[in-house]
Amino acid sequence: MTSPSILDTLITQPPIQSKRKPRTGMNGMSAAAAGFSYHDFYSHLPTHKYLHVPTGELWPASSVNAKLPPVNLADDSYVKAHAWLDEHRAVMQIVWMPGEQQVIEDRVMQAAGWQAHAGARSFNLYVPPSMVTGDATKAGAWLGHLERLYPDDWPFIVNWFAYTVQHPEDKINCALVLGGGPGIGKDTLVEPLRVAVGAHNVADITPAIMFGRFNRWVRNKLVRVSEVRDLGDLDRYGFYEHCKPYLASPPDVIRVDEKNMREYYVANVCNFLFTTNHLTDGLYLPADDRRHYVAWSARTSTDFTDAYFRKFWAWYAGGGMANVVAFLRGHDLSTFDAKAPPPKTSAFWQMVAAGEAPEGGEMRDVIDRLGNPDAITLRDLIDAANAAQMDSLGYELSLRANRRSIPHRMERVGYSAVRNPNAPDDGLYKVGGKRVAVYAKSSLTAAQRYRAAQDRTQPVPKQPPLPDR
């Protein structure tokens, strides 16, 4: 029989003798404060604070010492709790890595991913979901509700849900957009997924929270962004761009800025689920998007009664929830590629069309009049629009208030900005003595686009006058 470790016996070590009355536990023993033990804490060396494992909070040394008794060493001397933790239960980093042990040895997380480092220890904040036992063959009610809402999309949705459950350590490189009118049971559909990954591994946020400085929400396996709706043209473009690094990997890790905590790294494995009641004024999606699968339900609230949902949730409570969880855990994913671009559904193309600026067709007409050049400037478009008597387009493009949206409009007509490497401050080119942005065809290679931009900066030779007859 092996002797108990020092950690196993710490909770019964007597405190330092003093004139104070020693604290007692619930059983009257002189020990750690009730509900606390050395197993609950790790020393976080970079901050000299102490991680309380049950809550994930960092404590100051004084609070740790107030809850844990000092340690009686071999020479009959005593050391305070925080000092013992510094020596015996110290970590260099706090990370969040599904699929890894709670304490990760001999590696450190950097911006490029894991790096070997002998003797290093990192504490992993990820907590797996609780195991739920159910019968996968009895998930028919949930599958029926899913197929009723999304008759054309349900196979992809099942695969997306199941992969999220079965592979917490990996990321699906596309967000799932579940759309449809209110009152059709989208929340009811998603609830088993929340249970399967663990409610503590799910973040429910709004677009406004995504735009905020603090991104603690990325430390979750499932991030649900609810009520995605048009916030104005600039915000829609900005939201789409802001989401890009979160919706696919690489990057393999993301740095988390959490209030009142030192920044730390998490694995970029969170899967995003967007829900919206709005098809034509919801998400902005360009035609070449590869990061969203859009499912839209034609059902309305009148297709479902209150009795339907009461019966459905009673089925959940009676074991149906566990059955769906079991189904998702065991579903065959041999044909699902989590890294492949998702199919573009009819709902996807409706969102693309809804995001198309009304003047997009006119811009294409103007570009056609210019001969579809390899490179172009905003002034080229304005002059050509005015020459073609498209005064409203020329005026719209010339407004300073609209300048921030110009790059997005140019992308929609097949042109993207080319940065001038010789102008590191602003990346602009000099055309006609003025600093301007130059846009080149997105279909060209990087080298071809740069050459086209350089050619556009050259003055256009004047045509010689026609000879007199």
Image (spheres, grey):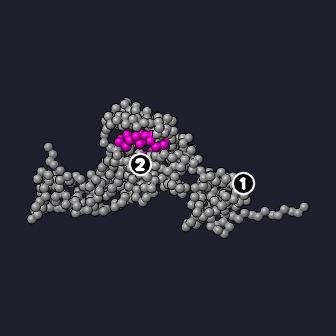
Q: Secondary structure at mark 2?
A: strand
Relative to 391, does residue 141 appear above or below in the rendering? above
User: Are there few (<14), some (14-19), or many (20+) residues within 10 Å of tag 1?
Assistant: some
Q: Residue 268 location, x and y as percent?
A: 42, 50
Position of 90 with respect to 169 (left or right) is left
Between 181 and 414, the residue placed more toward the observer is 181
Q: Are marks 2 and 1 in contact (CB under 8 Å)?
A: no
* Residue type highlighted by circle 2: Val
* Residue type highlighted by circle 1: Arg
Residue 54 magenta: no
The residue at 36%/50% (across/down) is 97
Q: Quadrant of the C terminus?
A: bottom right
Q: Residue 383 location, x and y as percent?
A: 70, 61
Q: Badge 2 is on which residue?
A: 223
The residue at 46%/46% (across/down) is 275
Which callout, 2 or 1, points at the residue further toward the start of the chain? 2
The residue at 17%/55% (across/down) is 33
- Residue, far bottom: 433
Q: Residue 35 location, x and y as percent?
A: 20, 52
Between 165 and 249, the residue placed more toward the observer is 165
Q: Secondary structure at mark 1?
A: helix
State which region is magenta.
Answer: 171-197
User: What's the mark number on residue 369?
Assistant: 1
